[in-house]
Image (cartoon, rainbow, N blue to C red):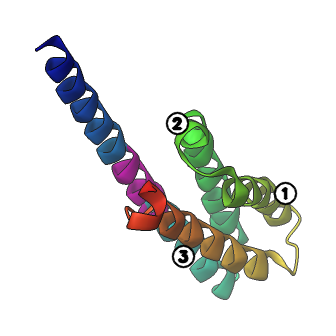
């Protein structure tokens, strides 16, 4: 009977971790995409003060969740996205011409993280 309770407890714990990871990935994707969209809109309006603040906000948000994400998320795309977030912060300060393309690339990387972490048969096995 103890084995059954242990197995049920392990199953409940696994489901809880999977649910928490899915909520975290969804939150990261939604919030990061919103901040990137704000920065892209500010670039179109030539409002570089707003671009700087959006890039800083994205960096702060990413750093706040970095430890949880690095423990749960596959590192292949996560590391690239982290590097691009550091890059856009400096690009925004220097009004770099390639900032818009880097933001679009970053948006794609964050979307790829979400796709890689979706619950699917391939991800489970």
Q: Which residue is mark 3?
A: 37
Q: Bounds of the magenta span?
A: 21-30
Q: Look at the magenta stretch and give its main secondary structure.
A: helix
Asked whether 93 or 18 is in front, the reply is 18
Q: Which residue is mark 2?
A: 68
Give the crowd class for mark 1: few <14, some 14-19, many >=20 residues within 10 Å: some
Query: Which marked residue is nearer to the observer: mark 1 or mark 2?
Result: 2
| First along the sequence among labels 1 and 3 | 3
Looking at the image, residue 31 sits to the left or right of residue 81; the answer is left
Q: Give the x, y percent position of residue 14.
A: 32, 36
Give the crowd class for mark 2: few <14, some 14-19, many >=20 residues within 10 Å: few
Disc 3 is placed on an element classified as helix
Give the crowd class for mark 3: few <14, some 14-19, many >=20 residues within 10 Å: some
Q: Which residue is mark 1?
A: 90
Q: Check if mark 1's residue and mark 3's residue have beta carbons within 8 Å.
A: no
Q: CA distance from mark 1 to mark 2?
A: 25 Å
Asked whether 36 or 75 is in front, the reply is 75
């Amino acid at each position: 009977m103890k084995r059954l309770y242990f197995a049920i407890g392990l199953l409940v714990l696994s489901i809880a971790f999977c649910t928490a990871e899915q909520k975290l990935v969804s939150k990261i994707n939604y919030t990061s995409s919103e901040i990137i969209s704000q920065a892209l809109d500010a670039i179109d309006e030539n409002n570089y003060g707003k671009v700087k603040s959006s890039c800083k906000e994205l960096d702060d948000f990413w750093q706040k969740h970095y430890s949880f994400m690095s423990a749960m998320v596959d590192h292949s795309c996560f590391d690239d996205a982290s590097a691009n977030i550091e890059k856009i912060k400096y690009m925004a300060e220097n009004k770099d011409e390639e900032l818009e393309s880097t933001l679009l690339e970053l948006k794609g990387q964050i979307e790829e993280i979400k796709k890689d972490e979706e619950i699917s048969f391939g991800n489970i096995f």
